[in-house]
Image (cartoon, rainbow, N blue to C red):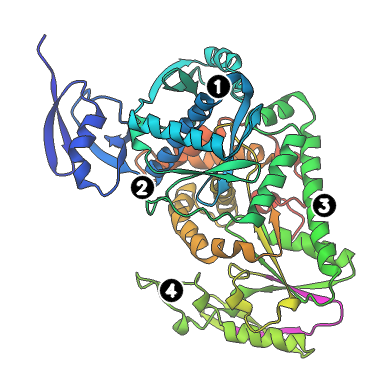
Amino acid sequence: MAKKFFHVQIGDTVRKYEEGTTYRQIAEEFQTDYQHDIVLAFVDDRLQELFKTVQSDCAIRFETTGDSIGHQTYKRSMSLMLVKAVYDTANHKDIEKVRIHYSVSKGYYCTIDGNIVLNQDFLDRVEERMQLMIAQDMPIQKRSIHTDDAITLFGQYGMYDKERLFKYRRVSKVNIYTMNEFEDYYYGYMVPSAGYLKYFKLYLYDDGFVLQMPTQEEPEIIPPFEPQNKLFQVMKESVKWGDMQGIETVGALNDRITKSDVHEVVLVQEALQEKKIAEIAAQIAANPEIKFILIAGPSSSGKTTFSHRLSIQLRANGLVPHPIAVDNYFKEREDTPKDVNGNYDFECLEAVDVELFNQQLQELLTGKEVVIPTFNFVTGHKEYGNEVKKLGANDVLVIEGIHCLNPELTESLPNANKFKIYISALTQLNIDEHNRIPTTDGRLIRRIVRDARTRGASAQKTIRMWPSVRRGEEKNIFPYQEEADVMFNSALIYELAVLKPYVEALLFGIDRDCPEYLEAKRLLKFLDYFVGIGSENVPTNSLLREFIGGGCFKI
C-alpha cells in the first residue's frame, strides 16, 4: 500500500509528513524556534496532545510552558507523576489517599492519608523516584473507557472520590491517563512523557508537603519556597470544615444536593460565614484605638457585601461604621500616570492622591470635621459636596480599595489605629482528590455572572479582560496579603452549583471562532461536574447575591 503524505503548515513553513507522524515529532523539529518547551499543538485551531498524529493537510501552531494553557498542562502532568511516585515509594496498602489541595507559594500543598511516616527521608525517596521517571522519559498514555467501566475501575483502585464523581457524568466516555501500570483521571490535557517535567522541588510543610513548580513567566526556573502562612491557615481551616461536613469534593457535594436537604448545606455554610464576620467585628470592637478598617482583595471576592455585613456586626457591637471608597481619592485625570501603552493606569498606587487621603484621615483622627471628596469619573476630577465626616467616640471608617493592605497607602497613620482585612474567594472544594479547583476559576465565574447582570458585558469580554485583571492583582494585591490582621474566605462550598445555570448560557454564547472560545469550552466542561442548585435556596444577605442579584443590600 502506497504511503500517504500530507502538507503541514507551521508558521510560514510548509512541509510534507507521512500519515501517522506524531505532533511530538514535528514539535521536536521546530523546538529551536521556541524559547520554552512545546507541550501541546493547535491543529487547525483545535487543541491537541502531542501523541496525536497527522491524518490530513493541516496548519499547526504550538503551545509552550510559557503560555497559559501549556503552563497548566505542565502542572497537571506534574501532579500525575507525583501521585504515581508516592504510590511507587510507599506500599500501596499503606496509602488511603493522596490529596492535592490548593496553591502554596508557587506550588501545590499535598497530604497523604494512611499508614506512612511523612518525613524528609520519605519525601527524598519520592523525589528520587520522580527524577528516575524523568530520566527514563516514562510515557504518559491516554485511553478512553466507558463511564460505567471508569466507576468500577476507580472503585477497585480505592479512588472513591473519582468513583463518586463519575456517577454524575452525563457523557458516556472518560479519558484515563496511564504511567506504566498506574492509572488516573485528570481534568485536561497532558504532556506526552515524564521527560517534559524536569523542573520541580518537594518541601515538607505543615502536615504535608508542597510540590513547588515554575511560574508561567519563568517556566525553567524553580522559584524559592516562600509560604504565606496566614493565607495557608485560612485555606487549611476551610478544607478542614469541608471535611467535617463530609463535603471534600464535587462528588460529595452532588450527593448532598441529590440525597439530602440542600437547604441545610446552604444555611450551615452561611452561618459559618456570619460567625466569622461576627468574630472579626468583636475583635475590632475590643480595641477602642481602631478607627480605620481597611479591606482589600482581588476581583469578585465579594468585598462590597462583606463590608455591609461587617458594618451590621460592628453596629451590633456598639460601633458606628462609615464607608469610605479609596476610588474617591483618585488624582485629577491630567495627573494620572499612564502605562507602557499610553493608557491611564488607574490600578497603580500612584493614581491615588495618597497625600490628601492621609491628610484627611489624620484630621479625622484628631477630631476635625472633614469634607470627603467624590470622584467624578466623567470629568476626571474630585468634587466636594455635602459629605462631611467627623469621628465620634464610637465611629469607625470602613475603607475599601485594592491598595488597602499596601502600607504606603496609609503611611502617615499610626498602625494602632488601623485594622486590615484581606478577603478572597479561596475555593476549598476539589473536583476529586487529585484535581483541584483553582481559586481564580471560581472568581472568574462569579465575575462573568455579575458583569452580564450589572454591566451588560458578554462572557467573551469578561474572559478577554481577565488576564489584565489578574496581572493587576499580582502587582497590587497579592504581595500584601500577609499584611492583613485577619483573612476572610468568601468562597461558599455550594456556590458553583448555584452559579452553573447562570454562567452556562453566557458561555455557550461565545462563538467557536472567537479567541475566548477555548476558555469557555474549558469552563463548560468543568461546570458539567456539578449538579445545579436553584437560587431560591440562597439567603438575601449572602455574599453570592452580589453576583446573582436579589440581595438585601444596596450595591
Question: Which amino acid is tagged 2?
Answer: Asp
Residue displayed at 45% across by 17% down: 181
Per the model, the C-alpha gap separating discs 2 and 3 is 41 Å
Q: Quadrant of residue 396?
A: bottom right
Per the model, the C-alpha gap separating discs 1 and 3 is 38 Å
What residue is pinned by disc 3?
Answer: 275
Q: Magenta segment: does it hold 363?
A: no
Question: Which amino acid is tagged 4?
Answer: Tyr
514 on left or right of 381:
left
92 on left or right of 390:
left
Per the model, the C-alpha gap separating discs 3 and 4 is 41 Å
Per the model, the C-alpha gap separating discs 2 and 1 is 31 Å
Marked residue nearer the N-terminal end (2 or 3): 2
Pointer 4: residues within 10 angstroms few (<14), some, or many (20+)? Answer: some
Q: Quadrant of residue 253?
A: top right
Marked residue nearer the N-terminal end (3 or 4): 3
Tag 3–tag 4 contact (CB < 8 Å): no
Q: Position of residue 21 (x, y in %)?
A: 20, 24
Q: Quadrant of residue 357?
A: bottom right
Name the secondary structure under disc 4. loop
Name the secondary structure under disc 1. loop
Q: Nearer the viewer, mark 2 or mark 4?
A: 2
Q: Nearer the viewer, mark 2 or mark 1?
A: 2
Question: Which amino acid is tagged 1?
Answer: Arg
Q: Is residue 164 visible?
A: no
- Residue 67: which numbered mark, if any? 2
Marked residue nearer the N-terminal end (2 or 4): 2
What residue is pinned by disc 4?
Answer: 344
Q: Which contiguous range is marked in magenta?
A: 383-399
